[in-house]
Image (cartoon, rainbow, N blue to C red):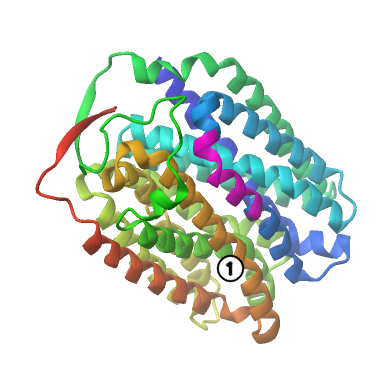
Amino acid sequence: MYSLLLAIIYVAFVSLGLPDSLVGSGWPVMHQDLGVPVAFAGIITMIIAVGTIVSSLASERVTLRFGTGVVTAISVGMTAAALVGFSTSEQFWMLCLWAIPYGLGAGAVDAALNNYVALHYAARHMNWLHSFWGVGASISPFVMGFAISSGQGWSTAYLLIGLAQAALTLALLASIPLWGTVDSARSPARTVRTHDLAEDAPAPQGRAPVPLETALRIPGVALILLTFGAYCALESTALLWSSTYLVAERGALPAAAAAFGALFVLGLTAGRFLAGFVAERLGDRALIRGGFVIIGVGALMLALPLSTEVVGLAGLVVVGLGSAPIYPAIIHSTPINFGRRNSQAIIGIQMAAAYTGSTLAPPAFGALSAWTGMWILPLFLAVLVMAGLVLSERLNRVVAVPARVRTHSVTT
């Protein structure tokens, strides 16, 4: 049952990534067809992010009531409906309308799935699962590029991805009975050190949720929220604006830029796959620290005013490689840093902080670039790198493993 459920979760992570690159890769054409300024892309992502913030904060409550399997299936179904709606949108306000159910579905499934994996599976699976998210996010720019270059239009790309999400929804509905087996069945396990902050067992279904004010008072929670917000602001900005940067600053054609914009996601995907092999040996803290440093190197490569485009394109890959381990490491360390009983509540709040960063950063960069020019993208990324690195190092000093520790089992 473990292997079957894990395979389903891997497919679900592919599904999570499929829609995430569509707006960024298609926007150079979409904004022209819809007759809106280029900076309006930030409005779409802001609406989606607000929906994810709301559903992330409510994720512990709904997951404890209905279970992870049900929440995952219903949430993916909502995103499928929203993507099909995107494909039928002929005006900008229609995109805004369909962005609401997309955001609500994305936030709930993100928090529920990440907590489930953090509690029940080894660190390597957390990285590999997020690598599979990258597989989905890497596929969709090529789907968008093909739809645009073949003359079918950006709406065809949304329709195809929406139908794929609908098929996954049916598979997830059929898998609902499997989700409770991991907690109850006996299986091989590994031992992990964890803080003695709460009861060792995960929160059972039906238990009252942890109040928001209680979770926020746990030492280090505020710092991890700021760190996660800075990282996700960086990731969402690179994901949304890299194609437009290539068109404006490197002279790439829109269809080619949609494909080149996938270089960031390809680096992200490859980096998470590789990180899975070393995650348990290096540890979450080293992965986060090294990731931010590598992103800084990639931003520098992206900014170099060279006559060749090769270094800049390679810089997008390096930014993706550096970004790779940060998100999985932050999530995976949550039960260890703050207690398994508190993990669903804190991961839900982390998702809200992440999408707050995603909400504010893309439109802020859109407004900034309209004033200064798109050349400022590498500098914008560098500032977020410094913020994330400083905050994460401060967190490491605040959240220290105490002398008194105990162990819990995590399914491999």
Q: Quadrant of residue 123?
A: top left
Residue at 30%, 46% in the rendered image: 338
Q: Main secondary structure of the magenta part?
A: helix
280 on left or right of 42: left
Q: Is residue 151 visible?
A: yes
User: x%, y% of residue 18?
Assistant: 62, 42
Q: Is residue 259 above or below residue 370?
A: above
- Identify the secondary structure beneath mark 1: helix
Of residue 387 and residue 260, the one placed in the foreground of this image is 387
Residue at 44%, 76% in the rendered image: 300
**How many numbered marks, from 0 up?**
1
Question: Outermost residue, bottom direction?
Answer: 372
User: x%, y% of residue 101?
Assistant: 72, 42
User: x%, y% of residue 63?
Assistant: 51, 31
Locate the C terminus by quadrant: top left
The crowding category of the residue bearing disc 1, from other C-alpha atoms within 10 Å (few below 14, some 14 to 19, many at least 20), is: many
Residue at 73%, 32% in the rendered image: 163
Q: Which residue is mark 1?
A: 361
111 on left or right of 20: left
Locate the N terminus by quadrant: top left
157 on left or right of 105: right
Q: Is residue 37 above or below residue 7?
A: below
Q: Quadrant of residue 49?
A: bottom right
* Residue type, numbered disc 1: Ala
Q: Is residue 171 above or below residue 74?
A: above
Q: Is residue 271 visible?
A: no
- Start-end of magenta stretch: 50-61
Residue at 84%, 67% in the rendered image: 36
User: Does the magenta-highlighted stretch encompass residue 13?
Assistant: no
User: x%, y% of residue 293?
Assistant: 34, 68
